Amino acid sequence: MSTYKEVVAYLFNQYPSYQKKGKDAYKGDLSNIKSLCKLTNNPEKDIKTIHVAGTNGKGSVCNILYNIFKKSGYKVGIFTSPHLIDFRERIEVDDDWITKDYVVNFYEKNLELFSDVKPSFFEWSTALAFSFFKDSNTDINIIETGLGGRLDSTNIINPELSIITSIGIDHESILGNTLDKIAFEKAGIIKANTPTLLGSGISSENVFSKICKDRNAPLYKAEEKHEFLKGSLPDYQIKNWSTAKKAVEILKTNYSLLNINDEPTSYITIKGRWQIVSKSPRIILDIGHNKLCVEELKKELENEKFNKLHLIIGFSNDKNLEAIISTLPNANLCYLTKSDNSRSVDPELIKQQIKSNNSVVFQDYKAAFLKAKANANEDDLILVTGSAFLIGDILKEFY
């Protein structure tokens, strides 16, 4: 019998993975996931779901809804990506990660069945999640798209609500290089006669309105007025909270959900999003990895009090470095580095674009982090950002 560690290593090494190969691992249709689910008796047809897409914010909205359903007494599953440390983070039911035994058994049971399909890593993971939720007899499941929406492997479900959190420029080589093109791809999760919710202040609203009208899908919009929450949450999380709160209003037709009364902090438990891991010096980890994310980070830094800013950054090779770098906050010291992921950009290339005299290259993220900690005084702030892989490595190594 295989061990969990052996199975995960095999999946990463044998199946095309976006984490390793980027767009080369992306499949441009849904035939593979449909085949996998057919071979496992179509578990996606036996579970209730909420489907969440968006350039930014989808992970946080999933996390908030997951916690609201749990606290309301429901048995709830959640499927998100990527993971930061352990693969099993992607698939949870009621705060328990999918068990190692279930992953191993699913792999061994279906290895030969899946051999002709040749799935990607994400397709395999999606089929695993659907099967686990069915076998766990969940009441509801929060499903986050991996990339895009229309051709994402998760897009074979018939959800009770489709949510699109935000639209921004990211993954241009796959989704398109304009907001409307990206919106069209995200709008692929809109289903006929199924309510659709748009996040607060979303772009390309006309694209969603037309598709909802064509599919007779009721369209809702999250409220934008939550000024009284300023100071208790990062501004971008206030938008995500608004979206989740509106979702609760829509879903109360079929579910007995708590009156959440604008107390968001107890419902937001997601890691890697403005995650404070130290207070002296203040160290914040955030997986912000595109221009829109960095713009939100800059706004949030305005609410922080500190002497010097130490910025540790590393990026993946599918990002528009010029756009992100032009948006970065001004730092007293900038530590350019990379994660252990094979798609990480060489920090020397970042150095060429950043054109700053106060930036230093570190080929080892551990050395960059330790140097920043050594340089920082108690009243300084260290911000680590640019890549989920970098944040995962920092968490795994130091926390």
Image (cartoon, rainbow, N blue to C red):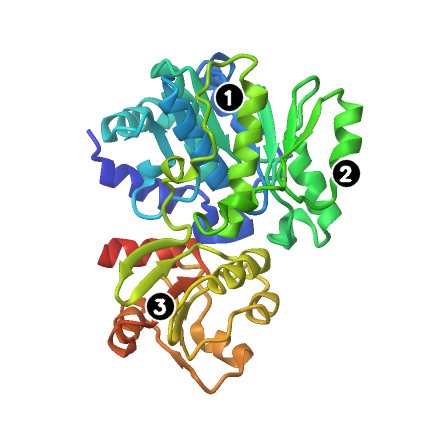
- Residue type at the position of mark 3: Ile
Question: In what element is the residue under mark 1?
Answer: strand
Residue 171 left/right relative to 142: right
Please tell me whether mark 3 or mark 2 is closer to you in this view: 3
| Residue 320 position in % (x across, y down) | 59, 63
Question: In what element is the residue under mark 2?
Answer: helix
Q: Is residue 114 visible?
A: no
Which residue appears at 20% of the width and 35% of the height? Answer: 3
In this view of the protein, which residue sits in the foreground, 172 or 124?
A: 172
Please give the label number shown on residue 49: 1
Residue 75 left/right relative to 43: left
Give the alpha-carbon distance from disc 1 to disc 2, as whole Å: 24 Å
- Quarter of the picture containing the C terminus is bottom left
Give the alpha-carbon distance from disc 1 to disc 3, as whole Å: 38 Å
- Residue tagged 2: 207
Please tell me whether mark 1 or mark 3 is closer to you in this view: 3
Q: Is residue 224 visible?
A: yes
Q: Outermost residue, front direction?
A: 228
Does 4 sit above or below residue 332? Answer: above
- Residue type at the position of mark 1: Thr
Which residue appears at 65% of the width and 46% of the height? Answer: 167
- How many residues crowd mark 2 within 10 Å: few (<14), some (14–19), many (20+)? some
Question: Which of the two labelled residues, at mark 1 and mark 3, occupies the earlier sequence position?
Answer: 1
- Residue tagged 3: 382
